[in-house]
Amino acid sequence: MLPELPSGLMGVLAARGGALAVKVGNESLLKTVRGGVTESAKAIGLKPEAASVLMMALAMSLHFFGYEFARSATLTLFTSKSSGFNSNSALPLVLACVCPASLVLLNFYTGLLDAVGPRAALRFTAAFCSAGLTAFAVVISGLVKGNGGAPPGKLIKFFVFSLFVFREAYVQLLATQHWSFMGSVLNASKGATWFGPIAGASSASSAVAGYTIGPLVQRFGVCGLLVLASISLVASLVFGEVAYEISEKHGFNPADEHFKEKKANKASGKDKNVENIFSKANNLFARVPALKFLFLETLICQGLSTVLNVTFIAKLRRAYPIDKDRAAFMGMFYALANMASGVFQFGVIPQIIHFLKPAWVWIFMPCVMMAMSGTQLIQNDPGLTLVAGAFMTMKTLEYSIRGVANELLYVPLDYESRYVGKEVIGMLGYRLGKSGMSLLLSGAGYFFAEGLGVNQLTAISSSISVVWLCSAVKLTKFLPEGRIGKGIKTRKH
């Protein structure tokens, strides 16, 4: 039976989350926070650009802080005997459904971005995601409680399934908007210096959240973690608003480029609103070939990540059959992954990245995973430690090295590439890679009595790592030749 929040406590948390959401719309709160930030920035000698990036970095850190709660709660609900699915094919199936949901969100976001600009788009999407998490928490908690410990019915499974899809879709939608702002304010040289620590701050916040999941889930229950994630998103929204207010006040708002182009298009009779997301992406990829091959590389990279994730979950389910133990293990696992990422982001990447060529970075990552997958392949029955180690290595590469290299690739590009192209690759490419691979795994699983086993999944991951290397080599042909942060052209600020 899932440990759930007492109904009174659930109501209190939901009410507080709602109260915070209301206060976000209060201009006096934003002015107070902005005033405090401005005074603090002056006291320590921060320029407005640095202060705005700091605020957006805090917004992103709070987003990922709450996401750890949402991720642990979702995976626990999904694999629980009282609310989720017992079949190994269920996880690939739900991951396959993430791509269509992401496509809907992406199409809505691009329309919203074009109509109201990046600040209002971030405000609305963050508020929507916060409200969604709280709604899922209340509904699922009530259904599980009313079920009285019986096997979950179709209604419970439907909401748990939908929550999983929603959680997978919203994380990239928000994080990409945070990075788009920071990549617009910083140039290549400053980005090479600060993107690592900025990503490291998010990893550190995720690690802290992961370590607190154990005691928090005992006190608030699994669904209570979703409400805590919702409240964290409200706080993230506030800091994002402050970042944009600083940029507007001091004349470096990234939205200025958007509205200037929109005004010019209107004057010339061009109407970009009629374009759907596919035509926008096609035109953008034709104009910027590097984004097209980054899209392909992302598909393959996330396909590999999906196989490793499914392998990890299958092994974890057998090792920890009790829900709260599994939730605590997942919290600790992602905490360690974020700590490892933080070591790279704070201590390693800022020291070496100025001396590296982009091609070296992109080729290094698949080579590491080829070695990890090969180690698993030679084992008759890889243990949980080895399987978890391979998945943790992949997540560490994603969170640290690939994350920074990916953001630096966008810095010299134009507004549309940084805001639309990044979302297309970050949401559609990222989720299509996961969903496409999940569909393939689901289909392949029908040929085995109990679905794909660890050995079959390991063979697949080894093959994909080779394909990833090939796609990375192709991408490097469109990357700058100079050292990162030194030989790369950048926009004028």
Image (cartoon, rainbow, N blue to C red):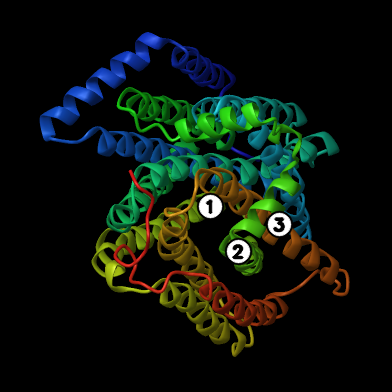
Residue 301, above or below 131: below
Report if the CB atoms under discs 3 and 1 are less than 8 Å apart. Answer: no
Disc 2 vs disc 3: which is toward the camera? 2
Secondary structure of the residue carrying tag 1 is helix
| Rendering quarter of residue 249 | top left
Toward the viewer: 425 or 282? 282
Marks counted in the figure total: 3
Q: What's under tag 3, amino acid-wise?
A: Leu
Q: Earlier in the sequence, mark 2 or mark 1?
A: 2
- Could you tell me residue 266's position as x and y percent? 64, 27
Residue 347, above or below 263: below
> Mark 3 to mark 1: distance in Å?
31 Å
Toward the viewer: 260 or 474? 260
The residue under label 1 is 325
- Could you tell me residue 132's position as x and y percent? 63, 28
Tell me if I can see residue 83 in this picture. Answer: no
Disc 3 vs disc 1: which is toward the camera? 3
Q: What's under tag 2, amino acid-wise?
A: Pro
Looking at the image, residue 343 sits to the left or right of residue 182; the answer is left
Which residue is at a point 17% across and 23% down the rendered structure image? 39
The residue under label 3 is 432
> Mark 2 to mark 1: distance in Å?
47 Å
The residue under label 2 is 289
